[in-house]
Image (spheres, rainbow, N blue to C red):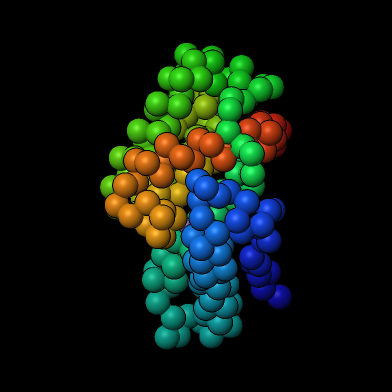
Amino acid sequence: MVKKYSLPDLPYKYEALEPYISKEIMTLHHDKHHLAYVNGANSALDKLDGGRKNNWQGVDLKAVERDLSFNLAGHVLHSIFWPNMKQGGGGKPGGKLADMINEDFGSFDAFKGQLSAAAKQVEGSGWGMLVYDPMSDQLLTLQAEKHNLLSSQTSIPLLVCDVWEHAFYLQYKNDKAAYVDAFWNVINWENVDQQLSKAKM
Ligand code: MN
């Protein structure tokens, strides 16, 4: 019995993040792009299941593993991304997250500058990410190229900013920096704080 992935509902309406992220972007992004990663990951699982039953005859396992990594990472990051945002978000974090940001980055502004720069400077399609690194018990920023490249393998994403063109081009055209700056107005800090608590358990 192969366990399958499924597309989570958006935790708000498609237009909830306007004017910062348009209804049109959110609709296509969730219903088409995220769904494609879910379907791609499930297709890879089916191929692995088929390969096991057929002694890997006619299955390019290396290609399937590559598909699984790409599509599963896409599914994971979008599933974190949607609840990272909310209508009326923005401002600054509180709770343990605020304390840890101050400890590990020096200040909220230093953290904001670092994550913004990481997101803006992604080469090609990818993500800017705030992660919890269990190896050192600290917060770090990382970039992801595509969804799965540049991973540290252990770090747990807490707050992710999708900088694929499908995330902003319909509204911001080529101005990725303006989109990243606008992203700070929709961040759901309570959700990011909850992600940190889960990551540290
Ligand atoms: Mn995306």
Q: Position of residue 164 (x, y in %)?
A: 39, 54
Residue at the (49%, 60%) spot, across then down? 25
Horizontally, is 164 left or right of 84 in the view? Answer: left
| The furthest residue to the front | 19
Residue at the (29%, 52%) spot, across then down? 174
Split into 4 quadrants, where in the image is the C terminus? top right
Q: Position of residue 176 (x, y in %)?
A: 34, 46
Q: Position of residue 50 (x, y in %)?
A: 56, 82
Please state the total of marks drawn on the protein image.
Answer: 0
Horizontally, is 145 left or right of 93 in the view? Answer: left
Horizontally, is 200 left or right of 137 in the view? Answer: right
Q: Is residue 64 above or below residue 177?
A: below
Horizontally, is 7 left or right of 112 in the view? Answer: right
Q: In this view, does 46 lie above or below 154?
A: below
Residue at the (57%, 78%) spot, across then down? 46
Q: Is residue 99 above or below residue 171?
A: above
User: From where the camera sits, is residue 3 visible?
Assistant: yes
Residue at the (45%, 27%) spot, across then down? 112
Q: On the image, which quarter does residue 96 sit in? A: top right
Split into 4 quadrants, where in the image is the N terminus? bottom right
